[in-house]
Amino acid sequence: MSETGSIGDGKEVFEENYGEPTQEGDTLISYHDDYILVSFLEGIANSVTAQFEMTDEPRRTESEVLEELRGMMPEDAVEVDAYEEPDYFRKVLVYQSDLVADSFEKLEDYNPFREEEAGTFILILEGEPEDDSYFGALIAPGHHP
């Protein structure tokens, strides 16, 4: 579904790309010295967080974030909206993906989509949009944080 692991992918995709988990809880697993945090539900990644503060480059511009996360995005992702939430220190990019819709459709106990928004997911850039300086990013299903 994605090059390095994204929402809808299984644990094996993350382990192929990031190695054994740094820490592992019931639903939250960290990889690559806590740089990548993944929440799993029924074996499928429900959210993926990149914590830039855990790296040698703790702040990134929007273009650097998008370049870095390109491999984490579903291959068929298409941006459909974007907006800033300055009160929450974030910018939200909204995407649509049939691969994401198909992946979550397989879950028995959890499906984050209502029929009209199946496959919609967000990329939240966390930091200071007005300064184009971000310390983290989150990919998760839905169209609102």
Image: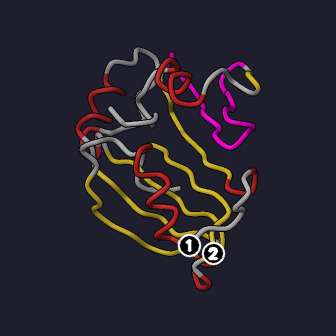
Reply yes or no: does residue 42 show up in magenta: yes
Quarter occupied by the N terminus: top left
Q: Secondary structure at mark 2?
A: strand
Q: Which residues are magenta?
A: 26-43
Q: Which quadrant of the figure has residue 60?
A: bottom right
At a point 32% along the width and 35% down the height, the residue shown is 100
Along the polypeptide, which appears first: circle 2 or circle 1?
1
Judge by depth and name the residue closer to the eye, 92 or 18.
Answer: 18
Q: Amino acid at mark 1?
A: Thr
Q: Position of residue 27 (x, y in %)?
A: 65, 23
To which residue does mark 2 refer? 133
How packed mark 2 is, by other alpha carbons closer than 10 Å (few <14, some 14-19, many 20 or more), is: some
Reply yes or no: does residue 93 show up in magenta: no
Q: Is residue 7 left or right of residue 89?
A: left
To which residue does mark 1 refer? 61
Q: Amino acid at mark 2?
A: Ser
